[in-house]
Image: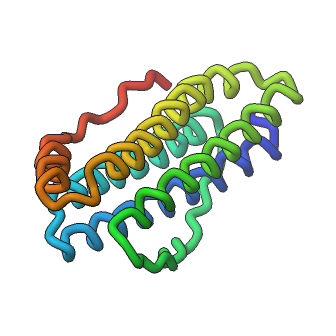
Amino acid sequence: MLDKNVAQLLNTQVNKEFYSAYLYLDFSNYYYEQGLEGFGNWYKVQAQEERDHAMLISQYLINNGGHITLDAIAKPDKKYGSFKDPLTFAAEHERYVTSLIHGIYTAAVKVSDYRTAEFLNWFVKEQGEEEKNADDMIKKYDLFGSDGKTLYVLDSELKSRSYSAPSLKL
């Protein structure tokens, strides 16, 4: 049986992951509207990943006797003044999500819930990758974004990103 506090933190994280999907869909829509289909695709795939993160945590809760409460998902409130803005917002957001995952992990270990800690190990690693990807996007944009030709090449490269569902055994 899950600790009540750990279960609540996991439930909250389900809703945070769905918000992340909304946020990345908003970034995707912005880029598509600007004619940057590669960037749009990159964030559409990212939204799919975040949705699946929510589903993985939901399934873990179900498998372990937890209850899921779905809250209303807040509308993303970011305003974009440049093509780089969503990239910066994404990096900030990934660092925030990392802090949430670390908080749940800490709470689980505190009550000796090693099963949940083991489950969260995948998310800890995933967040390291998410932060690196977000930082790499900024670096690439800083290198290539100021020139139309190289921005076009970068955008074309980002069109090739495809979605593959995570394989995490619950």
Residue that extends furthest to the right in the rendered view of this protein: 110
Note whether 45 is above or below 121 in the view shown: below
Residue that extends furthest to the front in the rendered view of this protein: 147
At 64% from the left and 51% from the top, the residue drawn is 96
Q: How is the image coloured?
A: rainbow
Note whether 168 is above or below 99 in the view shown: above
Note whether 31 is above or below 113 in the view shown: below
Note whether 148 is above or below 123 in the view shown: below
> Residue 153: where, in percent of width, then height?
12, 48
At 46% from the left and 79% from the top, the residue drawn is 79
At 56% from the left and 64% from the top, the residue drawn is 70
Drawn side of residue 11 relative to residue 169, left or right? right
At 23% from the left and 60% from the top, the residue drawn is 40
> Residue 125: where, in percent of width, then height?
54, 26
Q: Toward which corner of the image does residue 103 lie, by quadrant?
A: top right
The residue nearer to you, when weighing 130 against 134, is 134
User: Tag count in the figure?
Assistant: 0
> Residue 22: where, in percent of width, then height?
42, 66
> Residue 82: where, in percent of width, then height?
37, 72
The image quadrant where one finds the N terminus is top right
The residue nearer to you, when weighing 110 against 76, is 76
The residue nearer to you, when weighing 36 against 120, is 36
Drawn side of residue 73 relative to residue 100, left or right? left
